[in-house]
Amino acid sequence: MSLRAPVPPFGLAVAVALLAGVCLVQVQAQLPDTWLAVAIIGVGTWLFSRDGGLRLPGAFLIGAAWACFVGQTVMQQRLPESLSRSEFRLEGRVLGLPQREEESMRFDFLVGSGDAGAPIGQRVRLGWYGQAAPRVEPGSRWQLSARLKRPHGVLNPGGFDFEKSALAQRIAATGSVTTPHSARQLGRGQGTDHWRDRVSESIAIALPDGRGRFVQALAVGDTRGLTSSDWETLRATGLTHQIAISGFHVGMVAGLGALLMSLLYRLLPALGRRLARPQGAALAALVFAFAYTALAGFALPTVRTLLMIAVILLAKLMRRAQSTTESFALALIAVLLFDPLSVLAPGFWLSFMGVGWLLWCLPRQQAGSKFRAFLEAQGVAVLGLLPLTVWFFGQASLPGPLANLIGIPVISLGVVPLALAGLLMAPVSPLAAQWLWQASATVMDYLWTALEAMAKWPGAMIWLPEASLLTLGLACIGAFWMLLPRAVPGKSLAVVLFLPLCWPDAHGPAAGQVDVDVLDVGQGLSVLVRTAHHQLLFDAGPASARGLDFGEAAVVPALRAMSVRQLDALLISHGDNDHAGGMDAVRRAFPRVRTLGVEGWARPGMGLCQDTQAWTWDGVRFQVLHPPPLFPYLRNDSSCVLRIEAGGHVAILPGDIGRHVESRLVREHAGSLHSDLLLVPHHGSMTSSSPAFIEAVRPRWAVVSTGAGNRFKLPRAEVVDRYQQGGAVVLDTARTGALRFRLGASGTQLVAERRRDQARYWREPASPGAGYAIGNRFFDR
């Protein structure tokens, strides 16, 4: 007879085992074939059905195999690479709320039918550019032509992983509308999204000049009115989770539904004869949660919360007694089985870990003040979720605890109820709805004044370097230790476990060494050059009025993730947008940086980059080779050319110079052009990289900074072939992601290649083309 206690089939241990299996898959570079995943599910199910010690391994295998099966299925639904950048005639329906810009429109499109090879039945993300872009209504049906490509994003330290997001959101392709004149609207807007858009417009009319933006976000999940400044304030105060319809708000509304039903039972006791009060309250909570989730357009975070609530309430409706821990485990199992890709979203971890910490730390029956209980819950949440916040967002908010202490009750008990009351009154009395929305906005205005003041505190937002999974684990152990009962000794030592997460070893260059980080900024250029105690940024990436500002979206996050607290210099090679577009974003993030430009383009207050300049930082010599003083501004040919030498090894950053300037450099600096590392001029265009220049430089590494599938078709095959024939290893950031080289007395080393070093099955793999067959990544010259 076995003395081992049986493992409950839907208990916490099974939930954790299932989660572990799902998570293991998300760090894999490749997934097994679908048939193998199905076979493993079968084995896992058999083990799970056996009582005793086999149940947990079975749950683990089920989680891993199910995650493999779903991940493989979603990846197979993506547009094939062979059809990427092809044009298709599509017919389908607009999903969600389109993002309207001054000269563009961006929206998700569910493809109903189309040309052969089109992703039929899948979601694609489209941009409609130009001043003639129409007003695309949510829920409307269109026939249009679009050029599609597989989801592909830039990949940098601390940056947003678009390919992961596309996987989680089931985006099969991205693209842009072509031949707009041939697009036809087949049907007017309809459905929940269309209704949300109309209500949002009503709120905007009732609250002009942007006053209604928070009411729109909290009533119908429309965050389009929030500015970048708004989001910065929310991040600095740790309240981003409170804006828009979040999982927290869905739970709150479910509780409101249960409360209203309980009051109805008090007014009409006879209802209890038809349906027991606990079941009636559970049913009302479920209906309210479903309705509020619909208001958010069934966004994934709210659907996840709805599922959690539904599982717990259905158990109550079935009169099954459950402890809070059992309810927590059942909700976790339900979410993982419904969508194992949920673990890719920070909201999943913040939700479940937050609830888990509260269930474990706080007593079930709180005696004494409710306010004290609220304070304790806030303390547990802040400390317990700090490691995850730093891991996912690379930041910590100092005024966050105070802002949450004030903001959560004000938003949850004031702003949201008034906004929803206005929503309910709108069909009955538009005037009453307008008053309620104005009251909601007024409450938010007072709160917002306080939040903006907190966001301006010195050091309100602390940006922390990119951390490893090991440091996250140590910090979680530290949080666990600190939240143990008071009698547990040595709690002060637990703080030490946070240090690797908050102050990791950056492994920076030593004196006499230099790190050259070529960032992945699409069709543009941005390079961070670091010595032991100094940092220089060469170019800041592109920025488009109709698209991303890569300075803000890629360069600044990468600098913060690489522990750059202050830039010594920002050198803009020339004024073209793909090199200078992100400059303003970088200067906002590092307001004391000294900025250099070229003569004829440099703005007031900027220094000039001229070939009379040379300096030494920490044993590393920097020298400007071009342009000379009084050189006329000729755009590409005016590019600042920077030579960097460390320990006898050289890197050259030439901007977009053309063949005429290359000839001048060969003529005047022939003896100093030979280098280990060269940024290929003008992104590999035929206007540059002349045979004479390549012969004079003879680089070991030739790095091209381009955007994947760029319309210029760069780098040109002929240019790549020239460098390869000269003995160079050619690397393209579109295929590698961010690159890091270290130059010093011991040689030149490729230290990091983002897309290969952190390969994941959802990321486009590094191309097996030029340079990837090299086995030895260290070269001594």
Image (cartoon, grey):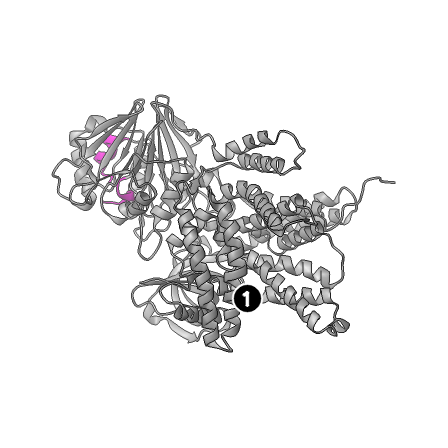
- Residue 613 is left or right of residue 548, and the answer is left
Q: Is residue 683 magenta?
A: yes
Quarter of the picture holding the N terminus: top right
Query: Foreground residue, 169 or 659?
Result: 169
At horizontal 65% and vertical 37% (from top left) the residue drawn is: 484
Q: Residue at x 58, y 42 (%)?
A: 384
- Residue 64 appears left or right of 420: right
- Name the outermost residue toward the left: 630
Camera-side residue of 678 and 254 = 254
* Region of the chain picked out in magenta, as a range: 681-698
Look at the image and say whether residue 52 sits in the magenta stretch. Answer: no
Which one is in front, 658 or 103? 103
- Residue at 44%, 61% (x, y): give it: 214
Residue 589, quarter of picture:
top left
Query: Can you tell which quarter of the image residue 766 is in?
Result: top left
Q: Residue furthest right?
A: 1
What secondary structure is the magenta-colored segment mainly?
helix
- The 10 Å Cα crowd at callout 1, few under 14, some 14 to 19, many 20 or more, is some
Confirm whether residue 635 shows in the render. Answer: yes
- Helix, strand or loop at mark 1: helix
- Label 1 is placed on what type of residue? Ala
* Residue tagged 1: 294
User: Percent x, y for residue 637?
Assistant: 18, 42
Q: Position of residue 631 (x, y in %)?
A: 13, 39
The residue at the point 37 percent across, 43 percent down is 556
Q: Is residue 239 above or below residue 719?
A: below
Q: Is residue 117 visible?
A: no
The picture places residue 99, in percent across and down from the top left corner, at 40, 62
Could you tell whether 21 is left or right of 615 in the image? Answer: right
Q: Nearer the viewer, residue 705 or 354?
A: 354
